[in-house]
Amino acid sequence: MKALSITAALAAALAASTATAVRAEQVFNRIASFAVADNLPEGEREAPTSAEIITASDDGNTLVYSDSPGKRIGFIDITDARAPAAAGTVSFDGEPTSVAIAGGKVLVAVNTSESFTNPSGLLAVVDLATKKQDATCDLGGQPDSVAVNKDGTLAAIAIENERDEEVNDGMIPQMPAGDLMILSLKDGIADCASIKRVALTGLAEVAGDDPEPEFVAFNGQDEIALTLQENNHIVIIDGKSAAVKAHFSAGKVDLKNIDVKRDGAIGFTGEQAGRKREPDAVKWLGDQRLVVANEGDYEGGARGFTVFDKSGKVLFESGPSLEHAIAAIGHYPEKRSSAKGVEPEGLEAARFGDDDLFFVLSERSSIVGVYKDTGAEPELLQLLPSGISPEGAVAIPQRNLLAIANEVDLIEDGGARAHVMIYERGEGEAAYPQIRSAEKDGVPIGFGALSGLAAVPDRPGFLRAVNDSVYTSRPTIFTIDATQKPALITEALVITRDGAPAQKLDIEGIANDGEGGFWLASEGNSEKLYSHAILHVNEKGEIKQEIAPPAELRANEVRFGFEGISAVGEGDELTLWMAVQREWKDDEKGFVKLVSYRPATREWGAVRYPLDKSEQGWIGLSEISAHGDFAYVVERDNLIGAAAKTKKLYRVPLAELKPAALGGELPVVKKEEVRDLIPELKALNGYVVDKVEGFTVDAAGSGYVVTDNDGVDDSSGETLFFSIGAINAM
């Protein structure tokens, strides 16, 4: 048994990112995204949806996913994989929990339980061509996973009979016990009379009288691997005889160098000793080995994956290596996770060309790890962006495709919808990540929620960025080397006050002070006791001055405040300009302030900036950055996906920035559109993210853009970082 080192994991994950066409690297890149709400009729698309477990037809042209909240399954036509098309839905009197395909039939596990103590369910057979239900089999309990063997003659269904987490603090045992059902198939039709029930009581050390089966998978010898997640146990069953051939505890892991505190800072300094694996998904690697995703759901979760042989011997333990690799691309979910980290949940395994691959789905970080199965220590090849909370995956190797189903739908919060995302394997370079971090002391520099950008003087391709209030305990200035691909965060400078990391800040903008230090803009929020402020910090990150807005501004403040800062001039002529994101109480609708401050005289002033109009959501400013004769401004709406319309870069001549005194009539500046950023935001074939937060021009005159991933909180976690080329200074 050998744990993959963080150095090896990162090097392997990024190898594909720096590949060249000359080396003919085979990499996965996302080629399409499908919002499952598009499968609903017009007028019903505001209803919550989900895409959980996903499967594919034998010809690889149709995807089928379960949508439990909608009590339906959905079909997607991927004959043209780059243009997936809605192909309809089938509804049920219950919640579909899993799907599998046998020939031309879809097997759907449906939960019809009236309560936790009186579980019930059925297996429905749906014709793939007609989308008509052919038959059902009563399962006598709540199904959670269904799988079909290689030749389509057997189906296995895990009957979980899940616990009620509101009863006895969720402790098990809670009856009735779960079990496994095996039945025969002929041309995809289930023979209900052939059902064999496999009792699983008395096997596990944890609540052995209440087995809770979670996930099921066949190997090529018709052996079934079954996880009992809460019981921390794995069972191997002969599919033909229904006999238990082996069973073993999933065991425990001693974890080190992990983040165990939900404290507003990413820090890999904690430990968890004797952590139960509690596996969710399981897949076979050939016929003799199996891999499990150690999500945890009861008392454990080991943050990675484990490879076992059929006897239960641990052949490989990933430990926190996947978690570290995920953190290095800005996807660590610090705000959501303390006990279980990135929560690996789903798995897929398939042979692509000459390579045996498996895919590990991280629910909380919204990342898919692509591993090469070497027969010994797996090799991490790539990290794929997935949408929000990947739940299921299906490989279609005959078409070099991979599809991922993402379960979370944020329609009620105005966020991203549930999506199915499609990836293609081919020669070339990995498009994602676009930015990553280096190691310090053997662990990655944790980052996320990047907001403002500034150039490093006299160093082309080098930038600085700041994070916002997602990381309340560690406001940080990052140094970025954009000459590398992907760009590399090389340093992290913590902003301090009186020798400790500064608190109650929401850093949204950064500018150089010309002396090695920085001017920072902090956006206020009275509900969180944050104040709008300008901060002056030295080259060590120490706050040397905190400048509060004057009473004339504070009297009309709202929480949408300073979203960028830029320095114009030098010495006594230095003027700081801050972009105010939204209209404040004294602003006319459709106009926001660009606020000025002269440190030498302590004078405040402002001009008015005209916003684009929007029929939906709101529009505001996210950045201001001076270059040459202009101040560049990022203007965006708060919309996401297909609804997004305004993600633009404008410029205002510096000659127009003639501030008037606060409290009086403010002049209106003229703006000129420089670039619509939506094409770049669509370039990775995901949905359009809402928060374009940072822009600057480097020492060589190239413009750079970064998006804010909200610390992977109600977000896909994707940080887009790209150059838009030369910016004219005049």
Image (cartoon, grey):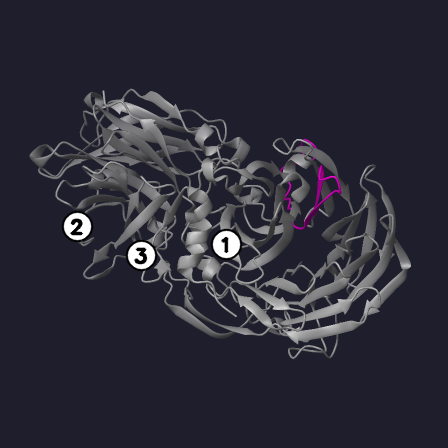
Q: What kind of residue is marked 1?
A: Leu
Is 700 positioned to the left or the right of 378 in the image? Answer: left
Residue plotted at (27% across, 41% down):
463
Q: What kind of residue is marked 3?
A: Arg
Expressed as whole percent of the image width and height from the top left, the position of residue 634 reads 35, 31
Q: Quadrant of residue 658?
A: top left
Expressed as whole percent of the image width and height from the top left, the position of residue 210 reads 71, 74
Q: Which residue is mark 2?
A: 539
Q: CA distance from mark 3 to mark 2?
A: 17 Å
Whether 341 is drawn above or below 505: the answer is: below
Query: Element type at marker 1?
Result: strand
Q: Which residues are magenta?
A: 40-66
Q: Main secondary structure of the magenta part?
A: loop
Residue plotted at (56% across, 51% down):
389
Whether 582 is drawn above or below 488: the answer is: above
Q: Is residue 501 visible?
A: yes
Q: Which residue is mark 3?
A: 474
Q: CA distance from mark 1 to mark 3?
A: 30 Å
Q: Which residue is mark 1?
A: 380
Front one among 587 and 144? 144
Q: Nearer the viewer, mark 1 or mark 3?
A: 1
